[in-house]
Image: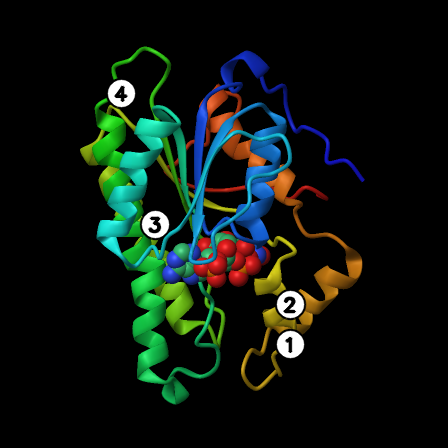
Amino acid sequence: MVTPVPFALPADQLAGRVAVVTGASRGLGAGLAARFAEHGMDLALCARTEPTLPAGATGLTAAVDVTDAAAVDAFADRVVDEVGPVALWVNNAGVLQPIGPHRDHDPSEVDRALLVNVGGVANGTRAFTRVARADATAGSGRPVLVNVTSGAATSVYEGWSIYGACKAAVDHLTRTVAAEEPALACWAVAPGIVETGMQALIRSQDAASFPAVERFRQIHADGSANAPAWVADHLAGLVAGTWAPDDVVARIPNEHG
Ligand SMILES: NC(=O)c1ccc[n+]([C@@H]2O[C@H](COP(=O)([O-])OP(=O)(O)OC[C@H]3O[C@@H](n4cnc5c(N)ncnc54)[C@H](OP(=O)(O)O)[C@@H]3O)[C@@H](O)[C@H]2O)c1
């Protein structure tokens, strides 16, 4: 099924504009890249596994671990030099584990989640603000930052203590940077439930580790998750001015009502 465009996306405001996506080797990030390419955007994609450009797309790909600040900075410089000024930067890379009661967590897994989900977003946000501030007065609209968050930032999901805490930190980091950088448009956006490897991992949990697991299995059975293209069109809408949430922390509406 082709995902309908939720609202008119003026092609002339997207074609040739540069979209950066971290964590674009699979899952939501790869889906965002594919849809941005359909809108004619140029792409800059990274993950630890070097992503592939969607067929017909132009841009660059790189193997980057978002926990490595220097590598993220070098990637941002390459994007500007080789692809062009950034119109949209999506800090999408993230991990869900550790899952289960907090008392049982492996401290090294906790450290890793904090490094990727908070440190990685901080690194990407810093790189974006550095390169985008230079372009912010170029006259083609404010460069847009999207930090991918989750409903788990505000709702309590037993079994996701660290994941939810990380996403709450992402929300607050984004609010603060939005206030610091009025020349940039900064958003924390929860995509809703999207069918990815992360969702398969969620469904594979037992109820002792993740008591809400049945709800997620039901959403899978119903086929009622948001398509990556639906999420992408909202994020592109932040660039085109066709989606304008009334708060820095926003949630993509459910595609299927
Ligand atoms: N799926 C959902 O329903 C849902 C709901 C709410 C929020 N989210 C958020 O959406 C984002 C994407 O999730 P997803 O479902 O697409 O997850 P996923 O299928 O597990 O994909 C995660 C992506 O992040 C990359 N990644 C992980 N660690 C990285 C690192 N250290 N450096 C660079 N890239 C890294 C992975 O690539 P490599 O392994 O190759 O590095 C992969 O491309 C996450 O921030 C997640 O919290 C997802």
Residue located beneath label 1 in the image: 204
Q: On the rendered structure, is 47 left or right of 201?
A: left
Label 4 vs 2, first from the N-terminus: 4
Which circle marks residue 200 in the picture?
2
User: Which amino acid type corresponds to the residue marked 3 in the rendered image?
Assistant: Asp
Q: Give x and y (percent) for residue 253.
A: 59, 41
Q: Residue at x 72, y 31 (%)?
A: 4
Q: Quadrant of the N terminus?
A: top right
* Viewer-side residue, 60 vs 29: 60
Dot 4 amino acid type: Ala
Give the residue displayed 27% in from the left and 50% down from the top: 71
**Image: 108 above or below 74:** below
Helix, strand or loop under label 1: loop
CA distance separating discs 1 and 4: 44 Å
Q: Which residue is mark 3?
A: 171
**Callout 4 environment at 10 Å: few (<14), some (14 to 19), or many (20+)?**
many
User: Along the polypeptide, which appears first: circle 1 or circle 4?
Assistant: 4
Foreground: 225 or 34? 34
Q: Which mark is residue 136?
A: 4
Q: Position of residue 247 (x, y in %)?
A: 39, 36
Residue 66 % position (x, y): 33, 55
